[in-house]
Amino acid sequence: MVRESPAPGRMRQVRKRAQGTDHRIRVVVIRFVLIASLVVAGLKLVQVQVFESDALAARAERQRVLEIPIPARRGSIVDRNGVELAFSVEARALAYRPAAERAALEKLRQTEPKTPTFEEETAAIAKRLHEVLGDAAPEAQVLAKLREDKKFVYVAENVEPAKARDLKKEFPQLNVEYRAIREYPGGDLGSNIVGYANWRKENPDINKHALHGLSGLENLRDNQLAGQPGTQIVETDERTDAVIPGSERGLRSAVDGSDLELTIDADLQFFLQQKAAEFGRRSQSKTVSVVVLDAKTGEVYALANDKAFDPSAKSIDPKDMANPAVTTPFEPGSVNKIVTAMGALEYGITTPETVLSVPGSLKVADRVVADAWDHGRINLTTTGVFAKSSNVGTLLLAQQVNENRFADLLSKLGLGTRTGVGLPGESPGSVLPLNQWSGSTFGNLPIGQGLSMTVLQMAGMYQTIANDGVRMPPRIVKATVRPDGTRVEEPRPEGVRVVSPETARTARDMFRAVVQKAPHQNSGTAPAAAVTGYQISGKTGTAQQFDRAAGRYSDSKYWITFAGILPADNPRFVVGMVYDTPAYTTPEGHTAAPFFHDVASFIAQRYNIPMSKEQSPIVPLIVP
């Protein structure tokens, strides 16, 4: 039997019906999948909201988003040779949340009775902290802190990072915070210059807790030393404070602070502090201050007082933190006679060998000025006037210099203005403006009364003649060293021409006679300042202190001063020193020349200064 093939038109109709059926099936399947997905999502939502809500809420509660600080390293302070005077080391603080921990343990014990009680946990923590930290964490004290009725307590400070890490691992409920400790390896070495810094927590924002300076350069240069802390956003476990891995984001890196390189020499600074304290005791002075300057650059090699403080001590006497070498001016006495000497030589009024007829006293306006020793009219060379420290002879020369030129010299020497040395609290001293001078003012100023200056300013006058007539303002910070190692020199101050090189050299030579020892009353006022093998140029000073209660100058309270140059024939260093209210009637309190001798001797040895090619000549001071 033969089958007939379907007609082509009929076959197309069959295919269309089959395709329509497939499409409807796909639509039904897709709808079923969508409905099933919604049902599953709904069931999951019900599960989350009804059956797991407590667990998820607890988990969310245990997580928090924090912006944590990234500490910046505080810069170090070093001397001119790289000796560290101050640097920072990392540490940690351990803290605890008594209220939260007590509540958490009580809640946990409801389902897990074997969980330690609050008392058991705190006792275990206190015992372990004492075992690890020793006397820094007395067990009884730590336990008392742990059980305080507070939300948050610190239980240990300045813990070594490794020890803190181990304790945190053993007791996750402890909070660990970053700390930095400022170390001062030399103890009180340079403390009146460097100052001190410690960890400050006054700011309620814990992220802003950091090391900050409280005095000295630590305070004045705090912004440079401190740097800029960074931040990072993290998620942490509420109870343990542990950072949840992978949650870190929003990093802003910290910028470390810069190091400060000072001009001082730590070895010389140490010696000066020891000697200042020694001569303070020997002279029975209220205070003693001393400074050593580079004769050419004005850099401060050492600056010391008889009192210092240990920045690491638990308590510091505020009086020991003072820095009278820059903050406390005094009347310099005869050390100031160098101004008259410079003026008289600069303006051609005299020469070192010129002989002056000097009476025993001189009336200036309404007062009579006399010399420290009784004499009638005597003949003094100009050198003798200054080497014997004649007040009358100095005033005779000053009158020829005249008030205007004298005032101009005071200004060029920087008196009455701050030196800009770079230390906090610097005093400008005091000099009356010329238009306020009375008739007797010019009877005071040339002999070092009626004006005031710091020991730094006083030394600066002698640095001027040591540097051939150019005053170089002193400085104590030599450079800053940035975190990347870039060294940036501090701006060098411009020198000030005060007198000609010839005047400076002549004055320097003339003042060598101050330390000469010779027969027939030709000794200067300070042979004790001499240093064997070296030419020394310098000047003694004694100034009465003004008694405000009596309204006049005291007859028993004095400032004793000395300023000198080593060596006079090739100046390397200038030394200035002052005693405040020494026991004037005793040999130790009557002159600072022995102090200068000890300092100059140490400097000559310390810096291997070549001896002078020849001794200072012995010159006549009194002429028959």
Image (tube, rainbow, N blue to C red):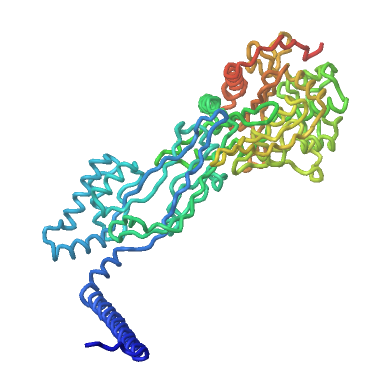
Residue 283, visible in the rendered structure: no
| Residue 598 placement (x, y as % from top left) | 58, 19
- Taking depth in this image into account, of 307 and 473 the one nearest to the observer is 473
Does residue 489 appear to the left or right of 54 in the view shown? right
Is 66 situated above or below 143?
A: below
Left or right of 269 in this view: 198:
left
Q: Position of residue 301 (x, y in %)?
A: 60, 29
* Vertical position of residue 523 compared to residue 440: above or below: above
The answer to whether 130 is drawn above or below residue 154 in the figure is above
Residue 435 placement: quadrant = top right
x, y percentage for residue 366?
A: 79, 37
Task: Decide: is 458 above or below 14.
Answer: above
Which residue occupies 66% across, 12% down?
A: 611
What is the quadrant of the N terminus in the image? bottom left
Q: Nearer the viewer, residue 175 or 418?
A: 175
Q: Is residue 396 left or right of residue 601?
A: right
Task: Indicate left or right for 302 with 346 as reference.
Answer: left
Q: Is residue 311 visible?
A: yes
Image quadrant in which the C terminus is located: top right
